[in-house]
Amino acid sequence: MTVSQKIASILLETKAVKLSPAQPFKWSSGWNSPIYCDNRVTLSYPDARTFIKKALAKAIKKHFPEAELIAGVATAGIPQGALVADVLGLPFAYVRPKPKEHGMGNQIEGRIEKGQKVVIIEDLISTGGSSLKAVDALREAGIEVVGMVAIFTYGFKVADKNFAEKGVKLITLGHYNSLIDQAIAQNYISAESLDSLKKWRRNPEKWEV
């Protein structure tokens, strides 16, 4: 079993991902979606949590061996990032969506130094908007972003475009196609649902039941 297949199995087995083509979820973007993925659920399962942190660490060693700092994207990337930083023996920080409105007013929490090479940890990539805000914040603080590693991506073209425009290399453990393949193999979805999921994937912004 490949890493992407294992991630798909974990998400399905822990019910971190829910597929509901007939009764879609509403995303914060306003999009209707037949799928909802909450990777935070995997933190409650020791075996799943261990596999994911080791897979993330291995991806960083392979693609970004120069990493000197791990940064998690608030909130879901914080626990994953802390686990990975511990595995790698690297410093850890996390990035808020915006500066704190009281206290020190920090957007980046943790000890950082200008010029450090950072790998950002994210749990989920949809359009990439919130993830890339963390990139901007770190760059503005003088940190060199060498890449981002995430647990799962929907694989939208708009995300590819956004990451390319920011010059950020993205590595993901799991992806939408692998998830759907595993869902079919495990009889998690019907043929009718599969057709709906494929249509959504092609044009998520305008998809309707």
Image: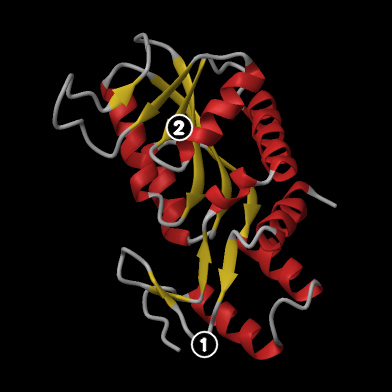
Labels 2 and 1: the sequence-earlier one: 1
Residue placed most toward the observer, 164 or 206: 206
Q: Is residue 191 left or right of residue 141?
A: right
Q: Amino acid at mark 1?
A: Ala
Q: How is the image coloured?
A: secondary structure
How far from the left and from the top, in percent, is residue 121?
A: 51, 35
Q: Residue at x 55, y 35 (%)?
A: 80
User: Looking at the rendering, in which quadrant would you find the C terminus?
Assistant: bottom left
For label 2, the SS is: strand
Q: Is residue 65 above or below residue 33?
A: above
Q: Residue at x 45, y 32 (%)?
A: 72
Q: Residue furthest left?
A: 102
Q: Is residue 195 above or below residue 152?
A: below
Tell me the number on the disc at residue 72: 2
How far from the left and from the top, in percent, is residue 131?
A: 39, 43
Q: Residues within 10 Å of mark 1 (few under 14, many from 20)?
A: few
Q: Residue furthest right?
A: 1
Q: Amino acid at mark 2?
A: Gly
Q: Residues within 10 Å of mark 2 (few under 14, many from 20)?
A: many
Tell me the number on the disc at residue 147: none
How far from the left and from the top, in percent, is residue 132?
A: 36, 41
How far from the left and from the top, in percent, is residue 192?
A: 65, 90
For label 1, the SS is: loop
The alpha-carbon separation of the residues under discs 2 and 1 comes to 34 Å
Residue pointed to by mark 1: 22
Residue placed most toward the observer, 56 or 11: 11
Residue placed most toward the observer, 135 or 79: 79
